[in-house]
Image (cartoon, rainbow, N blue to C red):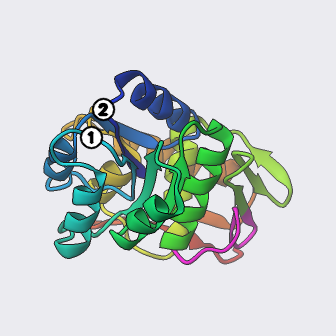
Amino acid sequence: MRILVVDDEVDLAEAIATGLRREGYAVDVCHSGADALDRMQWGAYDLLCLDLTMPGVDGLDVCETVRRDPPESGAPRILMLTARDTVDDRILGLDSGADDYLVKPFAFGELAARVRVLLRRDRAHDSSVLVVGDLELDTAKHEARVDGNVVDCTPKEFALLRYFMMHAGDVLSQERLLDHVWDENADPFTNTVRVTVGTLRRKLKGSGGRVGIETVIGSGYRLVEELDA
């Protein structure tokens, strides 16, 4: 899942991004509302971590613009981050289009939990554990299991598997995977998606489970619950 952190406090924005990357998300950072709106025209984001108070185009402006005129890739969930802590401020933020509101200073663990909740809500999941056949993915513990046995995944493989499981049965193109699992620094002309899908596929197959990744020629990849031979 791909997240855009928008905050004019540079150190805070980088700290949030670093933490979210450790959680397995692809994260981009910018420091103004205008830049955020520009990036959403060419980047597909699942969630914005958005500061409310910024010079020029502020968080409220970004929220209202996204809700009024969503990007072609779809409107992201919005978690508003702000030092404004009155009830009226929260109402204003939520009414402008934010999905959740977190007051600064905050513990990163709470931020990470709220991100998980918003991304589950976006895909109609009501648990931190995703299940497809005998494959389970615990997004809170960062653990993949087949019949209770842990599958050793790198952070990028975990992020890729999470996206596959949230869209199980859908054919996902390399471009879509690159948009949602990798950040803006990924080179679209490399074979990074194919290589990562290949290593993840081998790990799932080696786990002895029935869930696998199939290639749909000319279209992309699909996570399927395989039938017994």
Residue under the image location 30 percent in, 68 percent down: 75
Q: Dot 2 corresponds to which residue?
A: 8
Closer to the eye: label 1 or 2: 1
In the image, taking residue 202 as reference, residue 15 lies left or right, namely left
Q: Is residue 126 magenta?
A: yes
Seen from the viewer's position, the closer of residues 1 and 196 is 1
Seen from the viewer's position, the closer of residues 222 and 51 is 51
Magenta part of the protein: which range? 123-135
Secondary structure, mark 1, is loop
Q: Quadrant of residue 193?
A: top left
Residue 1 seen from this side: no
Q: CA distance from mark 1 to mark 2?
A: 6 Å
In contact (CB < 8 Å): disc 1 and disc 2: yes
- Could you tell me residue 204's position as x and y percent? 64, 53
Q: Quadrant of residue 35?
A: top left
Name the kind of residue labelled 1 in the image. Answer: Met
- Could you tell me residue 149's position as x and y percent? 84, 50
Q: Is residue 46 magenta?
A: no
Identify the main secondary structure in magenta.
Answer: loop
Q: Earlier in the sequence, mark 1 or mark 2?
A: 2
Q: Number of marks in the image?
A: 2
Secondary structure, mark 2, is loop
Name the kind of residue labelled 2 in the image. Answer: Asp
- Could you tell me residue 212's position as x and y percent? 58, 62
Residue under the image location 46 percent in, 67 percent down: 99
Q: Dot 1 corresponds to which residue?
A: 54
In the image, taking residue 52 as reference, residue 118 lies left or right, namely right
Seen from the viewer's position, the closer of residues 15 and 52 is 52
Residue 42 seen from this side: yes
Q: Is residue 116 above or below residue 202?
A: below
